Image: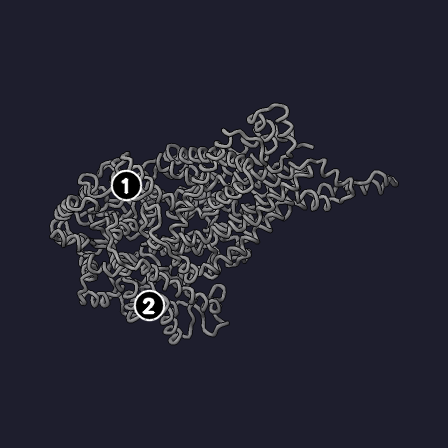
Amino acid sequence: MAADPRKAGPAAPRARAARRAAWARASRPWLLLAPALAVLAVLLFWPLVRVLLLSFQDYGLRQINTGESNYTGLDNYREILGDSFLWTTVLPNTVGFAATCVTLTVVVGTLVALLLQRLGRAWRAICSTAIMMAWAMPAVTGTYVWIWVFDPLNGVVSGGLDGLGLIEPRETNWFTDRWSFYAIATLNVVHHGFPFVAITVYAALLTIPRELPEAATVDGANAWQRFWHLTVPTIRPVFMVVTILSIIWDFKVFAQIYLMPGGAGANPDVLNLGVWSYIESFSRNQYGLGSAIAVLLTLLLLAITVVYVRALSKESDEGDAP
Amino acid sequence: MRQSPRGRSPFSLLSRRRRLLAGAAALSLGLLTACGGDGDDGSDGGGPTLEVWIMEGTNPDAEPYVEALEAAFGEETGALLDVQFIQWADAHDRFTTAMAGGELPDVAEIGTTWAAEFGAAGALADLSGSIDEAGLGDDLVPGLIDAATVDGSVYGMPWYAGIRSLMYRADVFAEHDLQPPTTWDELREVALRLRDLEPDMIPFPVSGGSEYGLYPFIWGAGGEIAERDGDGWRSTINSPEAVEGIEFYTSLATEDGLSVAAAETWLETDQLESFQNGQAAMVVNGNWTVNTLIQADPAWAEQVGVVPLPGQESGFSPSFVGGSLLGEFTSDEPELAWRLIEMMTTGELAAQWADQSGYFPGQQSLLEEVQGEEEPLVAPFARQMLEAGAALPVTELYGQVQGEQIVQGMLQRILSGDQSPQEAADEAAAAMDETFGG
Amino acid sequence: MTRRTSTAGRIGIAAAVTALLAFTLFPVYWMISSAFDPEADHRGSEVLPSGFTLDHFSHVLDDGEFGRYLANSALVGLGTVLLSGLLALFAAVAVARFRFRLRTQVLVMILVVQMVPLEALVIPLFLQMRDLELLNSLIGLTIVYLAFSLPFAVWTLRGFVAAVPREVEEAAYLDGCGWWGMFSRILLPLVAPGLVATSVFAFIVAWNEFVFAFVFMQDDSKYTAAVGLHRFFGQYSTDWGAVMAGSTLITLPVLIFFVLVQRRLAGGLAAGAIR
C-alpha cells in the first residue's frame, strides 16, 4: 500500500506523492477510529463533562427543574473528603470489595477458560452453556435469588446449617453484619462476572498457535511453565483488558448492593461509592454532591488503571512494537 | 413451617395483577394513536391531549376505570388523555429525569411526601385557588391535605388514602381464646402468650426496614419526629417521649424475643409475606393489604382481624396517613388539568377508584360513608384514619431524611444490638438536624 | 483438544467440571424451577418446586406483553452487536496496527469514559438524548448501548488484532491483496473468536440494561424486556412467579444467541490452522 519505490519520477511530483502517501498513512488510523470516537464523545464524554460541571454546584431539584446553574466551587469535594464516613466506611468497602471480586473473578474465569480448553467437545458445550446462563441471568434476578438462598429464616443455607445444628435461624441475620453482607455480595458478583472473563480468555486461548505448546511439551516444560511462559505472554493484552474492565465494573457495583436487605442506605456500614453517589443524588436530591462522589470514583479508577497499564505495558509494548 | 391456609387457588393473586396488565396492554395499544410526542400539541386529534401518569398496581383492574374516565373527560371537555402506568419503585427517578428534560406529564399521581419536594422545586402548580373555588377545602381527608400544603400552597389534591393498623390472625386468637390488645401492655402480654402457645410462629415481627411500623409508637408515647423551629425544623426523635416509644417497640424484639433476627432487615413487604405465609401472628400493616390477602385466598376473610393500633394506656396510637395525591405539573392546559383532577378525586369516579383499589377515598364525606358501612375489615382502619391519623413533618427535607433511611438505620442498629435506643435516637436526631440545617 | 491426560488429571477435571456446574447452575436452577412453581410466592427453602405449571409464563407473555418487549430487546440487542462489532474492529485495527500521535491517550480516554458510575450519567445522558431528539426511540437506545459496549469491544479486539502475526499480513500483501483484501480475508477470520466474545458482551449489555431503557422510553409499548420485568415488582408485594418466568424468558434468547455464535468460536479454531 505504501508508495511504490519502482515508480520513481521527477523530484517535485515524487515529493507530492510521498506527502500524499504520508498523509493517507497518517489519516487512516483516524478514519478507522472516527465512528467509534464520535459515538463515545457524544454519548459518554460530553455527559461526563456535564457530571464534572454538576460536581462543582449545589444542584437540587429546583435547579433540575429550572436548569439554572449554582456554582459553589469545591464545596462538594470539601464536604466529601472531610467526611470521616468516606475514609472509615465507604472507601474501605469499595476498595476491599472490588479487590476481592476482581481477584476472584479473574482467577476463577481464567481457570474455567483453561478447563474449557482441556474438555472434549460435548462437555465444553455443556459447560460453556451453563456459564452463559449465569451471565445471561438478569443481575436483578440473580441478586434476589442469592438473597433467598441466604434468607436467614427460610433460606436454603440457613435451613441446611440449622439441620446440622450449627445455627439458630430465628437468631441469625447475615445481612446486618458488614462482612457477611459483603461475602454474599461477592458470591453474587463473582457468579455474574466470571463468565465474561472465562469466555473472553477462552477466546484468546484459541488464538495461540497450537504448535507452540506442543513444542514446549517436547522441550520438557511442565504445565505451569507452559502456562506462565507461553500462554500468559500471548494472551496478555486480553488478560489486561478483562482485568481492567473487571476493576472498573467491580468498583462501580450498584444494583447488587442496593437491592440487598439494608443496602439502600438503612445500613450505612455497607455503603460503597456507587450506592452512596446514587443515594445522595436520587434519594436526597443533592445532585451536585452525588456527581462529586461519582467524579471521585472515576478519578480513583483512573489512577488505578494508569498504574496497572503502566506496569503491564512496559513489557507488552516491547512485544508488540513494530 | 407453612401454616398458611390451604386450598386456595395459587393464582388468584396473579390473576389480580393479570387483569391490570391486560388493561395496561389494551390501553397502550389504544393510546399509541393518541400520543403525539410531548402530548402538548393537540392539533392532530381534535382536542388537546393531556399526559397522565398513574402508578401501576394500585388498582388491580384499572382498565374499566381509565376507560370510564376517558369517556367522561372526553365528553365534557373534548380533550384526550394519554395515560401511562409507572412502577412505584422507579417512579421518583422517572419524575426527576423528566423534570430535568422538561418532559413532565400534565397531571400525575404523586406520593404524599413528594408534594413538598416537587412543590419546593417549582415543578408543581399551586392548586389552593382551584380547590377554594370548587368549595372542596373542608371536605378533604386532613392527613393528606396537610401533607400537600406548604406555606399556604397546595401542591396536590388528595386522591386516595391508606393507613396502617394492627392486623392479627383472628383464627389463632380464637383458638387460644385471646383478645386483641387495647393497650401496649396487653400487646406485649398477648404476644408473649403467643410465643409459648405457637412456638413456630413469630408473635410480632419488628421490621427494621419499615419506618411506618415505628411511628405509631413514637406518637403514641407523646413524642414527635421533628418540630418547627423558627423557619426551619429540628428533630425531636431523641426526646424522652419519643425514646420511650422507640424503646417499647424495639424491646418487643430485643428483650422479649417476640420477633426474629431476620426481621431486622425486613421491609413491609417481607413482613406481609411472613403474615401471608402463616408465620407472623400480628403485624402493623395497611388497609390495602386486606384486599391482597383475600384475593389470594378467600379463606383469609375469616382468618384476619383488624383493630386500630392500641394506645399506650388507652385510646389509639396515631398512624401515618399515606396515600396518593394528584398533582399538576405546570401544564399548558391548567383548566383542563384541574378539571381532570377534580373529576378523579371527587364524586363517583373517586369512590369507584377507592373501592377497586382497596384504599379510602381522599374526600372526607366519602370516607365517612365507608365507615358507616361498618365492615369488620374496613371500619377499624377507617376509625384509625378519622380518629388517630397523623402526618409526617411537611417539608421537602423530610423526603431527604426518608431517602437517607435515617429512621430505618436507627431501628436496625437497635435491633441488632449495636446501640441502645437512646444512643441510636441521638445519632438519628443529629443526622436529621444535619439534613434540616443544610 | 484432547491431550494425554493421566487418571489423576481426569479426576481433577471431573471434579472441576462438577464444581463449576454446581456453582454456575444453582441460582439458575432456582430461577427456572420457581418459574414453573405454582407456589413460587411462598417457596421458602424448598429445594424442589411444589408442582409444575406454565401459568407464570402465559401470564407474563399474554398479559405482561413480554412478547413485544422481547422483540424490542432483540432489535436493540442485534443492532448493538452489529454496530459495535463493526466500529470496534475498525478502531481496534487503528490502535493495534498503526503508530500515531495520541494513540495511548485515545486508548486511555476510551477507558475513562467507562469509569463514571452509570447512575450518575442518567440525567446528563437524558438531556443529551433529548437534545439529539432520540428519546423514546429504539434507535436511540441502540446507540446508547453501542456507547456502553464499545470501550470493551475496542480494547478486547485490539488484543486479538495485535496477536495476529504481522508476517501473515505481509504474506497477504505479497499475494497481491490490497489493505482491504487483507482485512476482510485474513484479519477478520483470525479475530473471529474475539468478535464472538465482544458480540456476546454487547448483546448482554443491551439485553439486561434497565435504568436507561426505562427512563428514555416514554411510551410503554417501547419498553425492553428488562423494563418489563420490573413491572412485576409491586410497591407492596412482588409477583415472584412472574419475575422468575420473565427472567427465564430473558435468559433464553441470550443462550440461543450464544449457541449461534459459538460456531464461530469453533470456526476460529479452524482458522487457526493457517498459522
The residue at which mark 2 appears reads as B344
Give how far across and how far down residue A119 sits, in percent.
Answer: 54, 37
Please say whether residue B432 is visible from this viewpoint: no
The residue furthest bottom is B75
Where residue B70 appears, as percent x and y from the top left, is 39, 71
**Please, which chain is the residue tagged with disc 2 on?**
B
- Please tell me which residue lies in front, B65 or A186: A186
A82 relative position to B278: left or right: right
Q: What's the image's color scheme?
A: one colour
Give the left or right position of residue C98, taking residue A289 as reference.
right
Q: What element carries label 1?
A: helix
**Residue underneath mark 1:** B412
Residue at the extreme right of the image, as rendered: A10
Residue located 51% across and 36% down the image: A112
Residue C34, position as x, y percentages in the image: 38, 51
Relative to A221, is B426 above or below? below
Q: Which of B235 and A290 is in front in this view?
A: A290
**What residue is shown at x 17% (from left), y 44% (from top)?**
B195
Q: Which of A273 and A71 is in front in this view?
A: A273
Amino acid identity at mark 1? Gln
Identify the disc placed on residue C266: none
